[in-house]
Image (cartoon, helix red, strand yellow):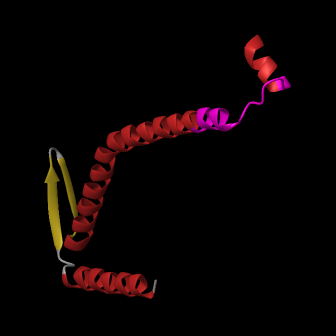
Amino acid sequence: MYLFLFLALLICIAIVLFAVQNAALVTVTFLAFHFEGSLAFILVVVFALGVLSGMLMTIPSFWRKSAALREQKRKVKQLEESAAVKAVPQIPGTKEEETKYKN
């Protein structure tokens, strides 16, 4: 746990140093839009948009895998129930045995 906190602190320090050293104003042009801001801010925004687009691209795969997992859990539950029914010994002449043949 402390290792992760230490790594997070190192990453935060690196980000602050990057932002301080890259404070120059730059202009970004995209289609008809023009935006002027610090280089560090623009790079952080572009990185965040890249992370977001990557996450959005994994959603269909995640949904397929979670649907397959739900189906497998349903099958396991059915198999466990059928195995439990078969594992119960039936004594001839008991009420369970009589109801078994009536259905």
Closer to the camera in the image, 48 or 79: 79
In the image shown, does 22 or 50 lie closer to the viewer?
A: 50
Left or right position of 5 against 58: right
Q: Where does residue 56 sit, x and y in percent of width and height? A: 32, 46
Q: In percent of the image, x 28 and y 50: which residue is there?
A: 53
Name the residue rendered at 79%, 18% in the picture.
Answer: 99
Tell me if 62 is positioned left or right of 90 in this view. left
Residues in magenta, as a range = 80-95
* Quarter of the rendering containing residue 8: bottom left
Where residue 91 sits in the image (x, y, percent)?
Answer: 77, 30
- Identify the residue shown where x is 22% and y is 58%: 35
Q: Is residue 25 left or right of residue 2?
A: left
> In the displayed structure, would residue 21 be above or below residue 49?
below
Rendered location of residue 60, percent (x, y): 34, 39
Front residue (pair 57, 47): 57
Q: Is residue 103 visible?
A: no
Q: Residue furthest top?
A: 102
Q: Is residue 46 above or below residue 63?
A: below
Q: Is residue 19 magenta?
A: no
- x and y, in percent, of residue 44 in the image: 27, 67
Q: Nearer the viewer, residue 37 or 47?
A: 47
The reply to whether the magenta stretch includes residue 88 is: yes
Q: Can residue 46 be seen from the camera position used here?
A: yes
Residue sticking out furthest to the front = 92
Relative to 70, does residue 25 appear above or below in the rendering? below
